[in-house]
Image (spheres, helix red, strand yellow):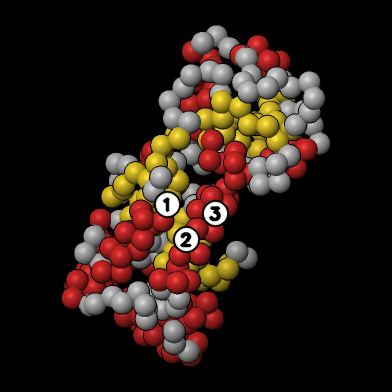
Amino acid sequence: MTLAAGRLAITQPAVSYALGRLRKLFDDALFVRTPEGMMPTQTAERIAVPIGRALLAVRDALNETEPFDPGTSDREFRLCMSDIGEQVFLPSLCERLQTLAPAIKLSSELVPVAMVVERMRMGQLDFAIGNLPTLKTTTRYQSLFREQYACMTRKRDELPAGKISVQDFLALSHVSVTSTDSSHVAIEDTLASRGLNRHIALRVPHFTVVPQILRHTGWMVTLPEGVAHALNHSDDFVIYPLPVEMPGVESTVHWHGAYDADAGNRWFRAFLFETLRR
């Protein structure tokens, strides 16, 4: 109740009163307390979709005519990106935002790809940013940039200069980042199609731990070139072009088509493209 009241900007008693009226109207508890917290009943889940559509239609109608002034707006834009996406994208976004729109707020979270469209449709998420090819058929999107893969390992004297051969690449043990996108699958498929097999010493779900792993081992990681440079801010690592040819990785911005006409959404889309496009 407290969290709901905060999001609605009303008091907790007001939320309790409104919920009580809805329970009488639908002759259903709507929400029940469980060990995991308050959970919706089947009736609540059934009515959520049509009510959500109706609320979005009202919001769209208001937003089409409501002006948006970034210089004075205190709107919060909710972003979905990975841990490494936050490292790559947020610094430049925040730097420009404090000048262009100092009152605007940002929040970032990692939402499972399967839930992104629904969260957007319900107005709980504004943009998803990253390598998200599976969202292209269900959202509006625009490409930011495409980059090549690189490989990175701890600096040491015995390493070759400039480039690394396929043989040296395969001789090392590797860290595989099995993130929410399909990059790691593309890497494995490319190597397998060439009859190449690398030793995966460690699989992790996120990039942020990789620098610490590499500092304590002689292992190597394959990752997008921009991500490699973002993780190498201390210059502890050597970054090589990937010795195996494979398609680059594309970073895109995704949003829900229901918000195409939203003035604030349009402004923030343009802001994202101007700031992040390479």
Question: Of circles 3 and 2, which is in front?
Answer: 2
Residue 216 percent coordinates (x, y): 81, 36
Q: CA distance from mark 2 to mark 1?
A: 8 Å
Quarter of image, res 230: top right
For label 3, the SS is helix
Left or right: 91 in relation to 155: left
- Which residue position holds label 2? 93
Residue 240 percent coordinates (x, y): 61, 27
Please say if the residues under marks 2 and 1 sit with CB atoms less than 8 Å apart: yes
Q: CA distance from mark 3 to mark 1?
A: 12 Å
- Which residue position holds label 3? 86
Residue 252 percent coordinates (x, y): 38, 45
Please tell me which residue lies in front, 273 or 28.
Answer: 273
Q: Earlier in the sequence, mark 3 or mark 2?
A: 3
How many neighbours does mark 3 have within 10 angstroms: few (below 14), some (14-19), or many (20 or more)? Answer: some
Q: Amino acid at mark 2?
A: Leu
- Which residue position holds label 1? 276
Q: Is residue 262 above or below residue 209?
A: below
The residue under the point 63% across, 23% down is 162
Quarter of image, res 28: bottom left
Q: Is residue 268 visible?
A: yes
Left or right: 240 in relation to 13: right
Quarter of image, res 145: top left
How many neighbours does mark 2 have within 10 angstroms: few (below 14), some (14-19), or many (20 or more)? Answer: some
Residue 258 got which mark? none
